[in-house]
Structures are given as structure tokens and as C-alpha cells.
């Protein structure tokens, strides 16, 4: 029973420690606002800066995992390069050792005078009282956040005291002392450090427990060193978990954290124990205390990083070799680096760079539409996630291109250049909206997949024809824009009108199927949403064509053209429209529907005339 009480007390202490550390770290992050994140991805142009920043930020938020997870997010979103992340992650490995020194305060004790004032109980009590006053009675949010930091610190200290109190009786336990001597075996100690930290998902917590155990007087240097080595590797577990669902650069960044600690563990294990086998160090049986464990942890981590700094370029090459690029992803790489500010003083060059970047944006939007349409017939969760991921990339295109073009409007440009910039400003939102509709289509596919349902055979056949028309209008728009081809641009509006007519016709057909009970209502909503998105895609393609034609207004009367196109239906328009109408003729699908109805009525022995009358009444 005594053993159960000790285990429960120890686990309670661990729980308080983890909660206090989390509360303190969250409060610190809220006080700093977004400043920590801004510092992380803006001031990391050299490995040394990254190393220092990673150390400082991790020392503040008390978690190397939290810092690295943040960096994984930056790299995954494209804000930071993998090379920039390496220095920060190395710094995070050093910064996390600061927690061990803070925890040493929990072992300060005294019975009288100044020593009593500096004891853990006194410090924790004062900090807790001030923290609760800040959190409860002060109005400003910044003071409430400071209150959280103080309360987190007090809870953390109490957790450490509880852990120490729980294990204190074990110093007299012969079985416990014998068990700890097992860890003097380097392999056993490393495995314990890895497994224990992977379970707790906190290197600081593992070091804290090791410090608490050291108060029993049973932890020697020989046992503490391999456990400390293993702790670093185990701390990579939450970082690796955070990389699930990220792109390849995000996975590479998470892998850097593991490689740093794994290399340090392997190198120092071989180096230290090889020398010890020859020299036989006298300090191996030295009894460890909380301060000496904090010192050993800091020295080990600092030595590992100093050893690895010269090999940063090799580490980058290694993670790229371990996580290889997908040819499809290489095609999707953003080309934001084209938008150099130094080109702004040369408008012709800057406009050319914008056009190239916009071509990339248009092609990525087209590819996202293709991905989403393919999900309707062959749903894949990975492909669905990729649609969402690429939508974020296209949003960044809109933001960066919009900002760059607005800067360009402030420079001196000729009239044709001004018109070109105006065209780009109009069309970037249309290309971004194309990708938005791709996301909407993927949501329709996801809904059908989750409900384990699908469109009827007739509806599926109609969707395939309409999807082909939508793909063609998107292809036509992207190619016309990329090549500045007005002859292709004038063909977009007739196809847009046909797509609109097909969408209306399919909506009417679907209503009829719903009345006849061939389709369920839940399919009806999904089908209607799909048609609406197809219609809007065609409309945005038309907007791009109009913007292109307006640019040539001096040589090409756009408004007259649109008027004749939409109202008078001139010869060129009608030729294009008839060509597309023949290409995407749905008469055969209608005939197949009517034939199926007729066969059904004959098979069931019903009178077709009465059946038609019943349908009209329904």
C-alpha cells in the first residue's frame, strides 16, 4: 500500500509540474503576443543568430518542443526555410536546459534567517499570492497573463516538492537502490531516458524527475549520464508527431530535432565510454544532486551543439536526402522570390516578374481544381488535404502579389504599364477565387465520402460531361493569360454561357430525379453545391478574359464586344457557342434517362400514360 501511495504522490507531482510549466509558458507567450514568432522567422538569416534566438525563446517559454513545433509550422507555411530552422532548433536544445537550473530553486531550504526567506515554500507562497491578486483583481489582460506566469511558477515548484517528498523514503529501500544501479549500464539508461521522455513528452519533466530522484542520494554520475542522453532523443517524439500532416519541409524540420539529439547521444556515448574503458574515470560513482544534474544536462547539450554547428550544411543535405522531394511538389513550389523590391525601380522588369509569378499562381489554381474534381470519383484523404494545403499557398500568392503590385503603382510608369498592372490587380483575386471553389468542391467530395453515398448513375454521367467543360474553360483561361493570347480569350465567354446553361439544365433534371425518388435529399444538396461552384468557376474565368480584353481597349472595343456577345450574338460568338454545345451535348444522357424510365415502367407492368400523369401530379 505504501508503494501505491508513493507512486500516486510522484504522479501527482509530475502532473502539477507539467501543468505549472504549461501555464507559465502560455502566459509568457500571451504577454509577448506575436513578437516571439516575428523574431523567430525574421531574424534568422545566419546560423549563429538562429542559435541565439532559439536559446532565448526556449528559455522563456520553457519548452524546446514548443519552440520546434512553432518552427515546423513556419517552415510548413513557407515563412521560413529549412536552413533557417536548423540554428533555431539547435538553440532550443540549449535553451531547454535552463529549466533544470530553475528547478534547483525548489531545493533551496532553510530553517531561520535569510535562508528561510529564500526557501522554496516562501518563494512559492509569495509568487502564488501575487499571481492570484494579478489574475483576480487587476483589469488589464497583460496583468492577468503575468498572474498566470506567477501561478504557473508556483504550481511548478510545488510539483517538484511533491515529487521530491514522494521519493524521499525510497533512499532507505534496498530494492529501489539496486534498481537504480541497473541504469549504470549505458544502453539501459539511454533506453529508460528515451521511453520515459517520449511518454511524458517533456525533456524538462524528465530532468525534473531525475533531479527529484537524486535527492535520495542513490543516483550516481554513471546512472545519470545515459538517462540524460536518452532524454534528448525522447523529447523528439512530440515534435515528430507535430509534423504529421505537414509538407515535406515540415517533416524535414522535425527530423532535424531528432538528428541533433541522436547524433549527440551516439557520438558522446562512443567517445566517453571508449575513453572510460581505458582511463576509468574516478567520478563515475559520484553521487549526483539537483545542481550537478542541471550542470551535466547543460554541458552535454552545449557540447553537442558546438560539435554540430560546423556541419549545418551537411545536416540540411541529410534531411533532404532522407525526405526526398515528390516531383509533383517540385512543380508546386512557389516563386515568390521573383518579386524582388530592387526591381521596383524598373517597372518593365517588375511587371515581367509579376506576370511570371501570376502564371505560376494560375497554374497552381488550375491544378487544385483538377485535384478537387478527381476527388468526386476517387476520394483520397491525402489528396483532400493537399487541396487545402495548396489553397493556403495560393492565398499567399494573392497577398504577396497584391502588396508588390500596390508598391509598383507608386512608381512612374507609362500608360501601357499602368494598364498592365491594373489588369494584374483585377485578375489575382479571380485566380484566388478559383482555388477557393476547388476547396468547396473538395468539401462536397468529402461529405459524400463521410456519408458513404454517391450520385446516381445519371447524375454521375452528367457531372462528368460538365466537369470536362469546366476543365476546358479553366485550361483556356490559364493558357490565354499565360500567353497573352486574345484569340483564346474571346472564346471564354461563349463557353461560360454554355456552362451556365448546363448547370441550370442539370439542376432541373436533378429536381425531377428527387421527385421520382431516384436521388435522396442529402445527395440533392451536394449536387446543387457542386453545380453552383462550377458556375462560379466559369464566371471567374470570364472575368479574367474581360480584364485581358479591356487592356487592349484602344485596339479592341471590349464593351462593344461584350454587348454583341451577350445580346446580339454575333457570328464569331455563335460559332464558338455551337462548337462547345456539340462537344458537351447532353442529349444522349437525357435519352438514356428516358429509356431507363420506360424500361422500368414496362418491367413493373405499369401503364406509361398513368405513370406520366402520376409524375405530373407529384
Image: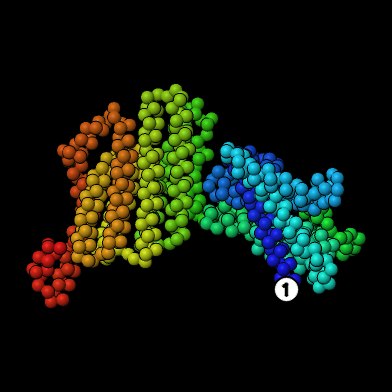
The percent coordinates of residue 269 (x first, y second) are 79, 61
Say left or right for 187 vs 474: right
What scheme was used to colour the molecule? rainbow
User: Considering only vertical position in the picture, is 406 above or below 572?
Assistant: above
Toward the viewer: 228 or 414? 228
**Image quarter in which the C terminus is found:** bottom left
User: Considering only vertical position in the picture, is 482 above or below 270?
Assistant: above
The percent coordinates of residue 188 (x first, y second) are 76, 68
The percent coordinates of residue 43 (x first, y second) are 63, 38
Instruction: Write the residue at 39% across / 47% down.
Output: 436
Toward the viewer: 26 or 64? 26
Mark 1 highlights which residue? Answer: 1
Badge 1 local density, few (<14 within 10 Å), some, or many (20+)? few
Q: Examine the rendering and report whether any part of residue 503 can be seen.
A: yes
Instruction: Write the residue at 12% across / 63% down.
Output: 617
**Image quarter in which the N terminus is found:** bottom right
Toward the viewer: 514 or 18? 18
Instruction: Say which element carries label 1.
Output: loop
Instruction: Write the residue at 60% across / 41% down.
Output: 137
Q: Examine the rendering and report whether any part of residue 295 can be seen.
A: no
User: Considering only vertical position in the picture, is 335 above or below 403?
Assistant: below
Instruction: Write the residue at 37% across / 60% down.
Output: 447
Say left or right for 221 vs 341: right
User: Considering only vertical position in the picture, is 41 above or below 156?
Assistant: above
Residue, far left: 609
Toward the viewer: 536 or 370? 536
Amino acid at each position: 500500500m505504501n508503494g501505491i501511495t508513493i507512486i500516486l504522490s510522484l504522479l501527482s507531482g509530475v502532473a502539477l509540474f507539467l501543468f505549472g510549466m504549461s501555464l507559465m509558458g502560455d502566459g509568457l507567450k500571451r504577454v509577448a503576443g506575436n513578437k516571439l514568432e516575428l523574431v523567430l522567422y525574421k531574424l534568422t538569416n545566419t546560423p549563429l543568430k538562429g542559435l541565439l534566438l532559439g536559446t532565448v525563446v526556449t528559455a522563456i517559454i520553457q519548452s524546446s518542443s514548443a519552440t520546434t513545433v512553432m518552427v515546423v509550422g513556419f517552415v510548413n507555411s513557407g515563412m521560413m526555410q529549412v536552413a533557417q530552422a536548423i540554428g533555431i532548433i539547435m538553440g532550443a536544445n540549449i535553451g531547454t536546459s535552463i529549466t533544470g537550473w530553475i528547478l534547483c530553486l525548489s531545493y533551496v531550504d532553510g530553517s531561520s534567517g535569510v535562508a528561510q526567506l529564500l526557501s522554496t515554500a516562501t518563494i512559492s507562497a509569495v509568487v502564488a499570492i501575487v499571481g492570484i491578486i494579478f489574475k483576480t483583481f487587476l483589469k488589464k489582460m497583460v496583468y492577468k497573463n503575468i498572474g498566470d506566469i506567477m501561478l504557473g511558477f508556483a504550481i511548478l515548484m510545488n510539483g517538484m516538492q511533491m515529487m521530491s517528498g514522494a521519493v524521499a523514503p525510497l533512499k532507505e529501500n534496498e530494492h529501489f537502490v539496486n534498481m537504480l544501479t541497473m541504469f549504470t549500464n549505458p544502453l539501459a539508461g539511454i533506453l529508460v531516458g528515451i521511453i520515459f521522455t517520449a511518454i511524458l513528452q517533456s525533456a524538462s519533466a524528465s530532468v525534473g524527475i531525475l533531479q527529484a530522484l537524486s535527492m535520495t542520494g542513490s543516483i550516481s554520475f554513471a546512472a545519470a549520464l545515459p538517462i540524460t542522453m536518452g532524454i534528448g532523443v525522447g523529447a523528439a517524439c512530440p515534435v515528430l508527431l507535430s509534423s504529421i500532416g505537414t509538407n515535406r519541409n515540415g517533416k524535414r524540420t522535425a527530423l532535424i530535432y531528432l538528428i541533433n539529439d541522436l547524433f549527440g547521444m551516439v557520438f558522446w556515448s562512443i567517445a566517453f565510454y571508449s575513453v572510460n574503458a581505458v582511463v576509468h574515470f574516478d567520478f563515475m560513482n559520484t553521487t549526483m544532486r539537483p545542481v550537478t544534474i542541471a550542470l551535466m544536462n547543460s554541458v552535454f547539450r552545449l557540447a553537442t551543439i558546438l560539435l554540430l554547428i560546423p556541419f549545418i550544411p551537411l545536416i540540411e543535405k541529410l534531411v533532404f536526402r532522407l525526405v526526398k522531394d515528390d516531383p509533383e511538389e517540385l512543380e508546386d513550389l512557389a516563386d515568390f522570390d521573383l518579386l524582388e523590391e530592387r526591381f521596383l525601380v524598373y517597372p518593365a522588369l517588375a511587371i515581367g516578374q509579376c506576370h511570371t509569378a501570376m502564371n505560376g499562381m494560375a497554374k497552381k489554381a488550375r491544378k487544385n481544381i483538377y485535384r478537387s474534381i478527381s476527388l468526386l470519383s476517387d476520394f483520397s484523404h491525402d489528396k483532400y488535404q493537399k487541396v487545402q494545403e495548396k489553397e493556403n499557398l495560393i492565398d499567399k500568392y494573392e497577398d504577396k502579389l497584391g502588396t508588390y503590385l500596390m508598391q509598383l503603382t507608386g512608381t512612374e510608369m507609362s500608360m501601357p504599364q499602368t494598364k498592365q498592372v491594373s489588369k494584374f490587380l483585377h485578375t489575382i483575386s479571380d485566380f484566388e477565387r478559383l482555388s477557393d471553389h476547388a476547396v468547396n468542391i473538395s468539401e462536397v467530395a468529402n461529405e459524400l465520402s463521410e456519408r458513404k453515398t454517391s450520385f446516381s448513375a445519371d447524375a454521375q454521367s452528367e457531372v462528368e460531361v460538365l466537369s470536362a467543360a469546366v476543365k476546358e474553360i479553366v485550361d483556356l483561361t490559364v493558357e490565354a493569360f499565360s500567353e497573352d493570347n486574345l484569340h483564346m480569350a474571346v472564346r471564354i465567354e461563349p463557353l461560360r454561357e454554355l456552362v451556365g446553361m448546363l448547370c441550370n439544365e442539370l439542376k432541373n433534371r436533378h429536381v425531377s430525379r428527387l421527385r421520382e425518388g431516384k436521388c435522396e435529399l442529402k445527395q440533392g444538396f451536394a449536387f446543387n453545391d457542386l453545380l453552383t461552384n462550377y458556375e462560379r468557376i466559369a464566371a471567374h474565368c470570364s472575368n479574367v478574359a474581360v480584364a485581358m480584353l479591356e487592356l487592349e481597349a484602344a485596339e479592341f472595343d471590349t464593351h462593344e464586344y461584350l454587348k454583341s456577345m451577350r445580346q446580339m450574338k454575333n457570328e464569331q460568338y455563335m460559332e464558338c457557342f455551337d462548337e462547345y454545345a456539340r462537344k458537351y451535348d447532353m442529349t444522349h444522357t437525357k435519352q438514356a434517362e428516358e429509356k431507363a424510365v420506360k424500361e422500368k415502367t414496362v418491367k413493373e407492368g405499369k401503364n406509361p400514360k398513368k405513370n406520366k400523369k402520376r409524375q405530373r401530379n407529384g
